[in-house]
Image (cartoon, rainbow, N blue to C red):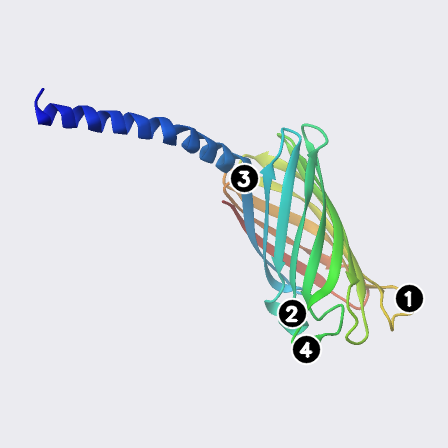
Amino acid sequence: MKIFDRLHIVCAAAALCLLVILTPQNVQAQEAEDKFSMNVTLNSDQFFGFYPFFSGGYSLSDQMDLTFYGILWSGGTGGGWGNWTEFGMGVSFQASEAISITPQIGFLGGSLLSSGAELGGVMGDGIVPNVTVALSTESMEGELYFGYYAPLREEGSTLAFTHYWANTGYKALPWLSFGAHWEHLILSGGSDVEESSDVYQWLGPYLQLSNPNGSTWTRFSFGTDVMEENDSFYKLTVGMSL
């Protein structure tokens, strides 16, 4: 047998061995990639200012995901709160074909709750136990969120907030949906707070335009602040699925 033919055989055998070794790894990598999901949104409203938000998960089973999220409150109003940053983790349960329930717990860096502004913001500014209930069917969408912002440190006077919202809408077309949004922020307590008080109560409609494949969307919510001393509200979100 010629040397050239032997080289061909050796190369073919080496390529076959490499294929046998790498194929299971590629399959495993693809399976892991399919189990991972992540969404990123850019948000703006007249209280929190501009704040990017991300959320994601890794599928543990058909009924449960390990989840994570983060809010970069540092833009807009948050710049005055020591570059307020929120990061959390939790799990998501598929309660039914249309409803998911996601309890999570977040940790804060900044100065809003702890008065750590003189320190330039502190890690451990607060803790945020929260839960999100999401609804999605062929014709309906909706979300219910509840979170409690409690201080973990005391660099001065402390604050605590309760934040919740609910919205539901109708999917009129594959790319168009509309509905109603209600959102409430309450100053719930703190070292110098004698009783809770409303910060805002927003109520109004929303309009959402989406790519039918779910990769991108934008939602505009607007309406009134039902508190007498406030006026209108507006909230804009642009999102993408990675």
Q: In the image, residue 49 lies at what x, y percent?
A: 63, 65
Q: Secondary structure at mark 1?
A: loop
Q: Residues within 10 Å of mark 3 (few under 14, many from 20)?
A: some
Side of 188 where 9 appears, left or right: left
Q: In the image, residue 52 lies at what x, y percent?
A: 57, 58
Alpha carbon separation for disc pair 4 and 2 = 18 Å
Residue highlighted by disc 1: 195
- Give, as a three-letter code, the residue at label 1: Glu
For the N terminus, the quadrant is: top left
Query: Could you tell which of marks 3 and 2 lies nearer the N-terminus?
Result: 3
Can you tell which mark lies on residue 36? 3
Residue drawn at (61%, 36%), measured in percent from left and top? 171
Q: Secondary structure at mark 2?
A: helix
Side of 30 where 204 appears, left or right: right
Alpha carbon separation for disc pair 3 and 2 = 32 Å
The one nearer the camera, 21 or 231, is 21
Would you place residue 159 above or below residue 16 in this image? below
Query: Could you tell which of marks 4 and 3 lies nearer the N-terminus?
Result: 3
Residue drawn at (70%, 71%), measured in percent from left and top? 111
